[in-house]
Amino acid sequence: MNVGGKHFRTIWLNEDGRSVDIIDQRWLPHEFRVVTLSTVEDVAVAIRDMWVRGAPLIGVTAAYGMAIQMQADASDAALDAAWEKLHETRPTAINLRWALDEMRKLLKPLPVSERIAAAYKRAAEIADEDVELNRSIGGNGLAIIKEIAARKKPGERVNILTHCNAGWLATVDYGTATAPIYLAAEAGIPIHVYVDETRPRNQGAQLTAWEMAGHGVPHTLIVDNAGGHLMQHGEVDMVIVGTDRTTANGDVCNKIGTYLKALAAKDNDIPFYVALPSPTIDWTVSDGLTEIPIEERSGEEVSYVQGKTETGEIARVRVSPEASPAGNPAFDVTPARLVTGLITERGVAKASRDGLAALFPERK
Ligand code: MRU
């Protein structure tokens, strides 16, 4: 996507052919900083501490982490150690394990001397594939937005609510939930996006709002608790969110608070869509509520907020009493029965085992 007139992906290989550059998302929207990751330790820190985040981007970054490790030491022992180190960084997003497994499956049978070139090639392919998957998701989601727009009176806008950041910053480019939004805006459909701020880390306020502003998409930032009220008053036509792991029967794990939006959407008869590339489907898991590990992050993310002071510094301020402990489950699970449809690269599936199997028959 364009930033200051220049096209950026969220991760790219450096000219040295070894290290990667990433957009360090901790400083957005206030500062656009690019940092270099040169070792597998750098990559692990960048994923764990959320310099990069979003399920697809976590996967691609980990794939490059494996390649960087091959450059340093391509032995079996180093490969397995890198898999473990990267896998333990964030437990919920399945794209991480998917990408690590892709790399290990490819590299293990190869002679050590061939592993470096093969690893960088596959990591680049995974990155390129992500862009293509998102483009296809965009087209499939656009058809739904068009249908809603067709039922509107002339000049009326389509109001879309989204949660967290499933935008280009969460992927390599385009985003999942945002791909249909960008295409609808390009097609001249009058749309408007309600952006949930998404406490505690404010990915909506800091990242999605920045994306929308950067691409000229009309939007309004709202607090997380406003969505239900807006839905009751006819202000939301559809919800589109991303996901960190969707089960084979269509349960959707996504950023904490997604479930409450789905409940409110159901109560108000508003379509609730989830946009996802197939690497986000965990075919080994059926019951999202009991089988998906939910990341518990530091309570400091709840007790403090980060922002820019009037004097221009980026600072963290405490919002709760020192004596109050904070809990911070980072994701929740929306049961399939609350999901209207899963927008994938192959089309829109019913959120059910049969619905997904119809689009991905090879997984039956
Ligand atoms: O904790 P984060 O910021 O990595 O969580 C991101 C989300 O929950 C996204 O909605 C999800 O990864 C889908 S991104 C296309």
Image: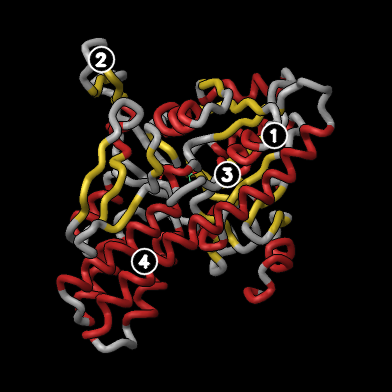
Beta carbon at label 1 within 8 Å of ligand 1:
no
Q: Nearer the viewer, residue 97 or 137?
A: 137
Q: CA distance from mark 2 to mark 4?
A: 39 Å
Q: Residue at x 56, y 23 (%)?
A: 219
Q: Is residue 342 left or right of residue 328?
A: right
Q: Residue at x 24, y 68 (%)?
A: 82
Give the mark count.
4
Q: CA distance from mark 1 to mark 2?
A: 35 Å
Q: Earlier in the sequence, mark 4 or mark 3?
A: 4
Q: Earlier in the sequence, mark 2 or mark 3?
A: 3
Amino acid type of the residue that numbered disc 1 sits on in the rendered structure: Met
Looking at the rendered image, the disc whose residue lies closer to the viewer, 1 or 4, is 4
Q: Is residue 75 left or right of residue 238?
A: left
Element type at marker 3? Answer: helix
Q: Is residue 97 left or right of residue 244?
A: left
Q: Nearer the viewer, residue 299 or 276?
A: 276
Amino acid type of the residue that numbered disc 2 sits on in the rendered structure: Thr
Q: CA distance from mark 4 to mark 3?
A: 22 Å
Amino acid type of the residue that numbered disc 4 sits on in the rendered structure: Ala
Local packing at callout 1 (Cα closer than 10 Å; few below 14, some 14-19, many 20+) is many
Q: Looking at this rendering, what residue extends furthest in the top direction? A: 310
Q: Residue at x 26, y 89 (%)?
A: 111
Q: Earlier in the sequence, mark 1 or mark 4?
A: 4
Local packing at callout 2 (Cα closer than 10 Å; few below 14, some 14-19, many 20+) is few
Residue holding disc 1: 238
Residue holding disc 4: 123
